[in-house]
Amino acid sequence: MSEAATAASPATPSEETTTGFRVVQRLVLPDDQELDVQSLYVSGVTSISSGNDAPARQSGSDYEHVDEDADDDDDDAEGGAGMSGFGRITEGSGVAVDPHKRVTLGTYFNAFPASYWRRWTEFGSVRLSARVRGHGSVIVYRSTAKGHVVRADSHRLDSDVAETITFELPLKPFIDGGWYWFDLEGGAAELVLEDASWGFETDKLRHGRITIGITTFNRPDFCVPQLQNLASAPAVLDIIDEIVVVDQGTNKVTDDPGYAAAAAGLGAKLRVIEQPNLGGSGGFSRAMNEAISMGASDYVLLLDDDVVCELEGMLRAVAFADLVKTPSLVGGQMFSLYDRSVMHAYGEAIAKYRWFWGPVAPSVHSHDFSKKSLRATSWMHRRIDVDYNGWWMCLIPTQVIREIGLSLPMFIKWDDAEFGLRAAAAGYPTVTLPGVAVWHVPWTEKDDTLDWQAYFHERNRLVSALLHSPYPHGGKLVRESLENHTKRLMSMQYGTGETILLALQDVLDGPDRMHHDLLNRLQEVRALRDGYDDGQSKPELDAFPTPRRKKLEKRGKGIPVPSTTIGKAKMAATGLLRQAFDTRELAETHPEGIVPHVDQRWYRLAHFDSAIVSSADGVSASWYRRDRAQFRDQMKRSVKMHAKLYKEWDQLAEQWRAALPELTSPERWKLTFEGLDDE
């Protein structure tokens, strides 16, 4: 046993001391035994590979790198091993390892994200405490920002009496990235881990208090189980001042059969506020405003209604926010609710020149931990610095809200991104902290660029750029907006095209109508779309005429799906040229084909004169029909409006920036809320 590993219990604070030991991350294990979830918490080790996805050979208990040129896409056998054949999760929420087997806690929820604590706090070391009994070894590892694995320390046990061993581990090597974790290796008999935690000696022993704000719209089947989950977690309840549920739907949370039990479990900590549908920005602003009005909470934790939380993550987020050098927003990452081992969003950034969101390089969307473990994924060992965090789970200090205001009245889309950018400009960064996460419906099951949401996507993207873009004329944004609108028209999506023009006009008109539009614009946009073919849908394909064409496709090949950039460019050019020609016979009375959503690329749709196109969620379809007059009319207006936006960018930016404090002020939001309450 090394000098760093000693049999001792963690220090506890007393009334006489001003410093003590604070746990910031505890061992957490899954409630169920399904392998897709289990791999996020604990995994048996069948083969050992280093963090740069290269094969490795085992030398004693070390990870020894072999080939730095290994393919990053190769599956890692360790990734989805689970516990079967290696040990079991005990009834006391511990881990029992079979003799001569090894399991790892180098997993998403149980590895320690050392580089984030190195970057955002002032601590020089972290203490790992593990309570174990039996026979075998506890082996601590760390990784580098390159994904290389280094053995840090170890302790061998040969006792049936549980003991607490501690490791004091330096944070100095983690300036660019890296994690700590530990493995358990069974000896001649079983080795049992009863508990483990990571923490620091600190004088910041007070736990921050939170108000949880949940915005819901007709999803009591998600929202009520979330409340029940919170009611079952005493450690989380201890730091909650209030749970504010802002119900904006017609299917009320309070009418759900499970609500009474949830309310009884939460008692006075639960408050439900009913208001008309103001979108996510209206619901979350209401929760923020309630929190700062009450004045007790240190933080507001925003949660979507349709998420499943790992509650330990809430405690970790609060601990991190309590201990950072600078007050910071602390965000959770997003797993897919449909494929639970898949990390859909690891970290979000704004590409400033084109002003669009996406994953922070080198992270990627849809990483599957059941196929590729944390340890074997090289990019995940780098620290990822974000521009903002989605409001599926985001902890915001109330002092930040008091200083910069509430959300912009955007209804949906870009409100979380704009708030994160505004906070950063005021000196408050956002940290998306690994090990803090929710399961949420992924964006791959939606397409918010086509339906009524296209209005809010376009308007709010432009507004946020006018407020925060560092580039003249917004960089590439105006040109990209024109290109996007042209693609919608070439795809026969004239209803979407008209909503984009409406959004553009509202931006040009200035900020005065934004609060008014919270209530009215959604209904107006939906009514506008109802007048167009692409805005009308039916649940069954049999509701449409059978596809027919008078003139058959050349050589029977149909419209291709090009796989190369050149092929796509050729299709785009010929598709644009096609807009000048009359529609083919039968196209008005019969669709020319059925296009699944996965294939409805604009450069393909441009070659149809009519087609049945399915929705992203797979529940309905619409009949698109080409209209030359619509194409010409919208294109003419689009070019004129985009030219005006480009020319007047500086004046508009000044106008929107001047209005920002008033638009986001609690006083202005209160007028909106009070006006609604009187109706």
Image (spheres, grey):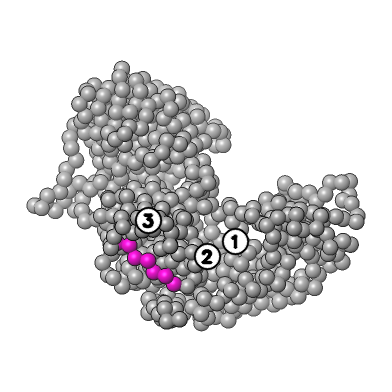
Determine contact: label 1, label 2, CB under 8 Å.
yes
User: Magenta stretch containing residue 481, yes or no?
Assistant: no
Query: Can residue 490 be seen by looking at this rendering?
Result: no
Magenta segment, which residues?
Answer: 269-275
Disc 3 versus disc 1: nearer the observer = 3
Res 531 → quadrant: bottom right
Mark 1 sits on what residue? 448
Res 600 → quadrant: bottom right
- The amino acid sitting under disc 2 is Lys
Q: Is residue 362 above or below residue 280?
A: above
Q: Position of residue 326 (x, y in %)?
A: 31, 60
Q: Between disc 2 and disc 3, whose residue precedes?
A: 3
Q: What residue do we see at 52% from left, 36% from top?
A: 371
Marks 1 and 2, Cα distance to the nearest angstrom? Answer: 9 Å
Disc 2 versus disc 3: nearer the observer = 3
Q: Between disc 3 and disc 1, whose residue precedes?
A: 3
Quadrant in which the C terminus is drawn: bottom left
Q: Position of residue 346 (x, y in %)?
A: 47, 49
Q: Position of residue 465 (x, y in %)?
A: 53, 69
178 or 129: nearer the eye? Answer: 129
Mark 3 sits on what residue? 227
219 or 438: nearer the eye? Answer: 219
Mark 2 sits on what residue? 413
- The amino acid sitting under disc 3 is Leu
Marks 3 and 1, Cα distance to the nearest angstrom? Answer: 28 Å
Please identify the dominant SS of the magenta region.
strand
